[in-house]
Amino acid sequence: MNISLNGISLIKSFEGFSARSYQDSAGIWTIGYGCTMYREGTKVKQGEMISESAANDLLLWHIDLKVHAINGLMQKVILNQNQFDALCSFVYNVGVGAFSGSTMIKVIRMNPNEPEIRNEFLRWNKAGGKEIEGLTNRRMKEADLYFSPIQKQQ
């Protein structure tokens, strides 16, 4: 599968754009649309700048990495587009490593429509051990998207 334009827009809405590097709620240097690393593997540092166009390209590169990882982790799981987009947003934020070792992935592999998955999203609302309102809101919206039925084309 691939992320939809709706999924990309969702990530952009959560991350927002910043031309100047800043420290996120966990103290990690971030730039553009929540990117912490450039294509060549160097980490974002204090005082760096990026154009919106370059930030969009970097975002799409990061998303592509997440899409590839999710497809590998979900090989035998049938997901609809909303479920996949929600997972892309989630993994973009928490990382592939955290997702691959999570209870959430185990539940999804057993039954991708299990209602408990909503609670699994909501468990990931902390940074630095503190609950962050913005992360709680993000997780609720991701869970809502995950459980939203696909709209039929007319």
Image: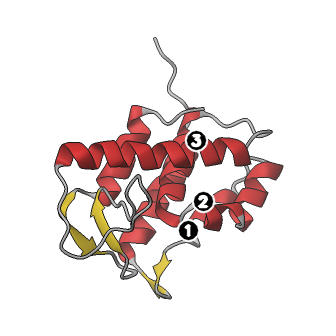
User: At 37% from the left edge and 57% from the top edge, which residue is drawn?
Assistant: 38
The residue under label 1 is 122
Report whether 92 appears left or right of 17.
Answer: right
Quick one: SS at disc 3? helix
Residue 18 in the image, given as x and y percentages of width and height: 20, 61
Disc 2 crowd rating (10 Å Cα; few below 14, some 14-19, many 20+) is some
Residue 136 in the image, given as x and y percentages of width and height: 44, 70
Q: Are marks 3 and 2 in contact (CB under 8 Å)?
A: no
The residue under label 3 is 84
Residue 30 in the image, given as x and y percentages of width and height: 32, 68
Q: Quadrant of the N terminus?
A: top right
Q: What colour scheme governs how the chains and residues are painted in the rendered image of this protein? A: secondary structure
- Which amino acid, mark 2? Val
User: At 72% from the left edge and 57% from the top edge, which residue is drawn?
Assistant: 105
Distance between mark 2 and mark 1 Cα atoms: 17 Å
Mark earlier in primary sequence (3, 1): 3
User: At 60% from the left edge and 42% from the top edge, which residue is drawn?
Assistant: 68
Compared to 128, does 75 lie above or below? above
Front-lying residue, 149 or 82? 82
Q: Quadrant of residue 82?
A: top right
Mark earlier in primary sequence (3, 2): 3
Disc 3 crowd rating (10 Å Cα; few below 14, some 14-19, many 20+) is many
Q: Are marks 2 and 1 in contact (CB under 8 Å)?
A: no
Q: Nearer the viewer, mark 3 or mark 2?
A: 2
- Residue that lies at the very extreme toward the top in this rendered image: 154
Residue 123 in the image, given as x and y percentages of width and height: 59, 73
Report whether 51 appears left or right of 57.
Answer: left
- Which amino acid, mark 3? Phe
The residue under label 2 is 96
Mark earlier in primary sequence (2, 1): 2
